[in-house]
Image (spheres, rainbow, N blue to C red):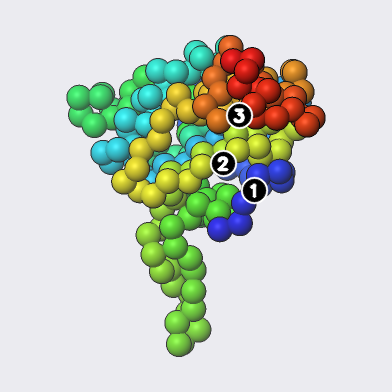
Amino acid sequence: MCTLVGKNAPAFTAKAVINGGEIVKNFSLEQFIGKKYVVFFFYPADFTFVCPTELLAFQEKLAEFESRNVAVVGCSTDGEHSHWKWLQTELKDGGIKGVKYPIVADSAKTISENFGVLAGEYTYNEEGESEYEGSPMAYRGLFLIDKEGIVRHMLVNDFPLGRNIDEAIRMVDALQFYEENGEVCPAGWHKGDIGMKETHESVAEYLSKK
C-alpha cells in the first residue's frame, strides 16, 4: 500500500446515507474543499461486532469534531440499503441508530481500493476470468484531509484492532495548531501544549520550556 499523505485525497462520487436515514446518490468529499477538514474512515462491514463500537464512538465525539470545523464521514463496502437498515436498528439489537454523520456505500470497492485499504485484490485465473482473492472488505483506515483536499494523516488497522477516536481528535488539533502557529508538534503533544519552532531549536531547548 502506497501512502497518500501529502497527496490529494482520491475523488469519488457515490451513494451514501446522511442524517441517519436519507439516501443520496451523489455524495462526494469535494463538497468540503475550501470549507471543512474531513476525517474519512473505513470500517469492514455493517452488522458486525467491533465496527459499531467505532461508529458509535465517532458519534459520541461528533460535537468535538464539529467544533473544530471537521466533517466526519464513514465508508464500507456494504450497499446503501444495508447502511440504512443498520442505522434504523436499535443498539440493543446490534444497530447504530442515532449515528448522524454520512456513511458512504462502496459496493464496487473502488473507493477502498483507491485509498489503499481494500483487504484483497482482483486477479485472473487460468481461464482469464476475473476473481477476487482475499476479504472483499476495507481495513480500518482513517484519513485526515485538510481544507485543500490534501491527506495530512493516515492510519490503517487490521480487522480485529479498533481505533482510538481521541487520537483522531488529537491529530486534528495538531494539524490546526501547525497551520495557525507555524510550529510543529512533538511526541505526545496535546492541545494546549507548546510546539517546536521549525528552526534549529534543539530538543533540550524545547524540553526546558515545558
- Image x and y of residue 160, in percent: 31, 46
Closer to the camera: disc 2 or disc 3?
A: 3
Residue ID for mark 3: 186
- Image x and y of residue 120, in percent: 44, 62
Q: In the rendered structure, which disc, 2 or 3, sits on the residue that comes first in sequence?
A: 2
193 to 160, vertically: above or below: above
Is 25 in front, or is 134? 134
Location of the C terminus by quadrant is top right
Residue 192 in which image quadrant: top right
Residue 61 in view here: yes
Q: On the picture, is 47 further left or further right than 137?
A: left
Q: CA distance from mark 1 to mark 2?
A: 8 Å
Q: Secondary structure at mark 3?
A: loop
Q: Secondary structure at mark 2?
A: strand
Label 1 with label 3: CB-CB less than 8 Å: no
Residue ID for mark 1: 4
The disc labelled 3 sits on which kind of residue?
Pro
Label 1 with label 2: CB-CB less than 8 Å: yes
Q: Residue furthest right?
A: 199
Q: On the picture, is 198 further left or further right than 188?
A: right
Residue ID for mark 2: 154
102 to 127, vertically: above or below: above
What residue is at 33 percent from the left and 27 percent from the top? Answer: 96
What residue is at 25 percent from the left and 24 percent from the top? Answer: 91
Q: In the rendered structure, which disc, 1 or 3, sits on the residue that comes first in sequence?
A: 1
Q: For the residue carrying disc 1, how many other residues have a C-alpha within 10 Å: few (<14), some (14-19), or many (20+)?
A: some
The disc labelled 2 sits on which kind of residue?
Met
The disc labelled 1 sits on which kind of residue?
Leu
Q: Secondary structure at mark 1?
A: loop
